[in-house]
Image: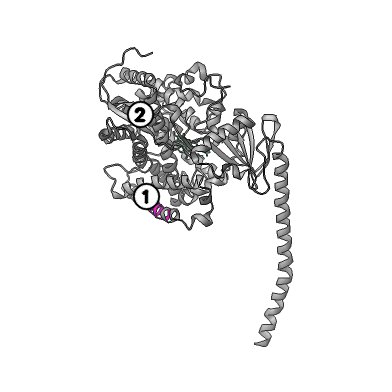
Amino acid sequence: MTSLVDETEVPSYNTRLIFYPLLLLASSIWILYRWQQKSRMYKFAEKIPGPAIIPFLGNALLVLRKKPSELVKFALEYGEKFGNVVRVWMGSNLIVFLTDPNDVEIILNSQVHIDKSTEYKFFKPWLGEGLLISTGDKWRAHRKMIAPTFHINILKSFVGIFNQNGKNVVEKMRPEIGKEFDVHDYMSGVTVDILLETAMGITRKTQDESGFDYAMAVMKMCDIIHQRQYKLWLRFDSIFNYTNFSKQQKQLLDVIHGLTNKVIKNKKETYLENKAKGVVPPTLEELTKTTDENVLANNDKSLSEDVFKGYRDDLDFNDENDIGEKKRLAFLDLMIESSQNGTNNISDHEIKEEVDTIMFEGHDTTAAGSSFVLCLLGVHKQIQDRVYNELYEIFGDSDRPATFADTLQMKYLERVILESLRMYPPVPIIARKLNRDVKISTNNYVLPAGATVVVGTLKIHRNPQYYKNPNVFNPDNFLPENTSNRHYYSYIPFSAGPRSCVGRKYALLKLKVLLSTILRNYKVTSDVTEDQFALQADIILKRTDGFRLKIHPRQRVPIPNVA
Ligand code: HEM
């Protein structure tokens, strides 16, 4: 026994003798490194204009007591005061706001600066390592896999789903006729229904109670994440984990992940059963391959193809090979198929993360986008009349559903949507964490590694250098003659470059079908003027006063005297 004690004590003494000095050395190196890194940051940041800082807190006090509705105004005012590059310190974190399209292009068009900022961590329990927050090789591989599932042929096959759900929401809104109500509730509901069907293949018919619970859970989870963005104390996990929000989040995620897992399991089983019977769905390659008859003619392209062509991303590349409509498959079916046939190496868990990501990204953005368009048309009667006359020219007084070809004729409606996304971009800022120094075009400032860069989309979209009367809602801002010479990075509602929104074409197509269906059935009016819209900035731009609107049954006749 004694000898045993003696034997263990000698190495333990030796271990401590080596371990503690090593720990001390490592900690000192770490502290020195952090100090060096910070002082490097201070050195570069010093040159960039920004509000005066106080020790330790930096500029944190400036935003501490601001309500979310005050933050938009505040950010715009500071932009006016300090210019296109503004430096702010939140404690020891350096944040640089950029609003010059030339600087923004350097960041967004880069293959290097693709890391999301730490704010995105709130999504992690829900979206895991999905496309929105993953980075590096994982993001690259998954982006390559997922972008083709948004090919225009796949999107065309969704037009029927967009129509049916458009009709459903028209019926759902009927009891609101003549009353003031919040249209966002309806846009949010219909968006989740459409996503359930296009992302997971869950239709109203096949949807049981769990589909409804899922939709509610998605909406409530978005709310919790919003709360964490603007209630500063909820940003700390150590506080958040002890709140009711955290308990609620766990329950909601059980519902969300429970359904996604269940659907993936069922779909995979069905896929394997069918395969055993020799029934195999068309592959993504088959659905998106070129044939001579169905290459997209130039005049078959929508207006926004030109608006976004300057930051050609993988979405454009994919679509140049187009075929006609084939069998409809949800994004999930396509992912299962490509993982099973060996085209892509993606696990069930990763498929779940990507489906959850599409459900999140596709939901709040389009719900806010469509609500803004309806409210703006409620305010601008002349513009709504012109939209309706265009729809009347396409559909007459018929009630037939819209086709993909019809959507290409909705040129004025498309300009209205693009203009609404300009003035009220649903994603008002984009944030990146720099892992390398980068020199920008304004004054050759160097933004140091470790800093967070925030691209101020809302401010860029209201720059008088690029838009005459930038605070006036004017769809003609998107006439070809006005877009042709404009800086591409002065219009970035879907971001741009390699990490641009993979759902851009899906969103625009869906918005056109959904909004045209609503506007063919209802005239919309707003008692609230545009200057009374109380904007709230968090991850998604919304109105704190609610998207208040009135609807009235539409007489299906052309409107006279419309300019
Ligand atoms: C009006 C509607 C939409 C707007 C304004 C919008 C805007 C954006 C923006 C600005 C980003 C970049 C975010 C960032 O870098 O932080 C983004 C990314 C993304 N969006 Fe959208 N989006 C919309 C609709 C959709 C839809 C309908 C889907 C899917 C069905 C979708 C899926 C995604 C995904 C997966 C990403 C991450 C892409 C990546 O990092 O590679 N979005 N979106």
Q: Is residue 520 visible?
A: yes
Considering the numbered disc 2 on the image, is that residue within a helix, a strand or a loop?
Answer: helix
The disc at residue 515 is 2
| Total tally of numbered discs in the picture | 2
Please say whether residue 255 is one of the residues in the magenta stretch.
yes
Q: Which residue is mark 1?
A: 268
Residue 546 x %, y % = 39, 36
State the extent of the magenta-drawn residues as a range. Answer: 249-260
Q: Quick check: marks 2 and 1 in contact, CB under 8 Å?
A: no
* The residue at label 1 has a CB less than 8 Å from ligand 1: no
- Residue at point 70% right, 31% down? 444
Query: Which residue lies most toward the front here?
Result: 65
Q: Residues within 10 Å of mark 1 (few under 14, many from 20)?
A: some
Residue 322 x %, y % = 42, 28
Residue placed most toward the observer, 342 or 327 = 327
- Residue at point 66% right, 36% down? 50
Please say whether residue 418 is one of the residues in the magenta stretch.
no
Residue 272 x %, y % = 35, 50
Q: Residues within 10 Å of mark 2 (few under 14, many from 20)?
A: some
* The residue at label 2 has a CB less than 8 Å from ligand 1: no
Considering the numbered disc 1 on the image, is that residue within a helix, a strand or a loop?
Answer: helix
Q: Quadrant of residue 13?
A: bottom right
- Residue at point 70% right, 55% down? 30
User: Mark 2 and mark 1: span between their CA atoms?
Assistant: 35 Å
- Mark 1: which amino acid? Lys
Q: Quadrant of residue 520?
A: top left
Classify 24 as above or below 216. below
Q: Considering the image in quadrants, where does the N terminus appear?
A: bottom right
Residue placed most toward the observer, 337 or 420 = 420
Residue placed most toward the observer, 283 or 134 = 134
Classify 522 as above or below 353. above
